[in-house]
Image (spheres, coloured by chain):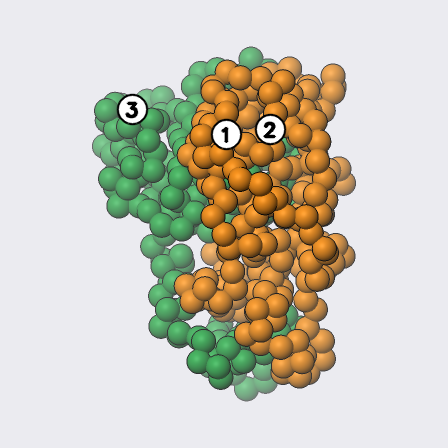
Amino acid sequence: MSASDDGYDHGPKGDHHHPAPLTDVEVRVRALEELLREKGLVDESFIDAVVSAYENDIGPLNGARVVARAWVDPAYRGRLLTDATAAIAELGYAGPEGDHMVVVENTKVVHNVVVCTLCSCYPWPVLGLPPTWYKSAAYRSRLVREPRVVLREMGLDLPESIEIRVWDSSAEIRYLVLPERPARTEGLGEEELATRVTRDAMIGTARP
Amino acid sequence: MNGLHDMGGMDGFGPVQVEKREPVFHHCWERRVFGLVAGSAARRLAGTTAAFRFAIERMLPSHYLRASYYERWLTALATLLVEKGVVTREELVGRAGDSFPLSQPAPVLHIPTSARSQAPHFVVGDSVVVRNEHPSRHTRCPRYVRGKRGTIVRVDGAFRLPDVAAHRDVPCAEPAYSVRFSTRELWGTAAGATETIHVDLWQSYLEPA
């Protein structure tokens, strides 16, 4: 998308010379923002900094580094499973929606997957902002009812012999799934392992 | 409140649609909404996180379903700023030039006032039943576990009870737990036998089984 000078898209057909009319929601956002700015309640540099942080710095690579460290360092894995908030903070990751972390570990017989049925709670410091599908009515309504079917539809076909544990983050705890280390990765270093860890594997809708 | 937001177990929404290589924000206006909400939170203009969630839950159901995630954020922020007197509805409508849909007013609410215990009443392994209550206020007790029997699997610290925090900015911490339910307890005999659902619940929502 191309941002025009006023920070709005002007719709998909807009260009610099012939901007498309603003959509209804864009009109509302601009109205509220103008009013707050006139009242001295908008701090541009704060908004730019927070948006930039979530677009550029705070994302799934943070969680992937946590997972990779746990794969190579058994003592770290132990701390991660007993006090996840502190263990994640060791790597420098903390902040809103990450104050009370719990890490749930996949094994040969247990697979974990996370949802928030009431809104879209998600561990921002380690995964960034949630993808649209995580916030969708389909995922929120169905995962707690038919998790095995939903995972299969999303490409993860788990046999009945594997117990599926669904975690509905309905209070203050935010969850991160610790996937099993893939086979034949013994020779890989921590940084290389981190590149194998996907966002969806840490939500639990995929395996690395 | 028994709102549309409480989606666990509902039918009809179809398959989960996954967008490949999704950007963090799809439109510039979403960046602005995210920044305005974060900025308003930093200035304490719009109340607690629980109040923000309740404002989303109070959207007209038809608007809630139609709106994208960040349109819900916009609606909740504008609603709370009007209710706090930071801006007026007339200012918003005048500036938007047409209409500015806000969430519905909060109904007359029963807010718990009794003293809460910060001491945990349950330990790991205890059997509990979720109280079958349907308050019109904000609550984080999903409908799909009310009246259901589960087992405590983790005792967490004390956190502010959202049923109070959404409505009054007063001390209201009490213990929360992770409670394990079998899918068959929740959904009947057609549900899978090797699936468990864990829901994080405050002490007020639970009683001994």
Q: Residues within 10 Å of mark 2 (few under 14, many from 20)?
A: many
Point out the frontmost of discs 1 and 3.
1
Relative image position of residue A87 (x, y in whole percent): 28, 35
Q: Which chain is disc 3 placed on?
A: A
**Residue A124 position (above or below residue B125):** below
Residue B144 appears left or right of B201: right
Q: CA distance from mark 2 to mark 3?
A: 31 Å
Q: Which chain is green in the rendering?
A: A
Q: Residue at 58% across / 76% down in the picture?
A: B87
Point out the frontmost of discs 2 and 3.
2
Q: Secondary structure at mark 1?
A: strand
Q: Nearer the viewer, residue A53 or A206?
A: A53
User: Label 1 is placed on what type of residue?
Assistant: Tyr
Residue A78 tag number: 3
Residue A145 image-quadrant placement: top right
**Residue A141 position (above or below residue B182):** below
Q: Residue at 53% across / 43% down in the picture?
A: B161
Residue ID for mark 1: B177
User: Label 3 is placed on what type of residue?
Assistant: Gly
Residue ID for mark 2: B206
Q: CA distance from mark 1 to mark 2?
A: 10 Å
Is disc 1 in contact with disc 2, using a CB cutoff of under 8 Å?
Answer: yes
Colour chosen for chain B:
orange
Q: Nearer the viewer, residue A5 or A178?
A: A178
**Nearer-N-terminus badge (1/2):** 1
User: Label 2 is placed on what type of residue?
Assistant: Leu
Q: Which chain is disc 2 placed on?
A: B
Relative image position of residue B10 (x, y in whole percent): 73, 38
Q: Residue at 50% across / 29% down in the picture?
A: B177
**Residue B11 position (above or below residue A158):** below
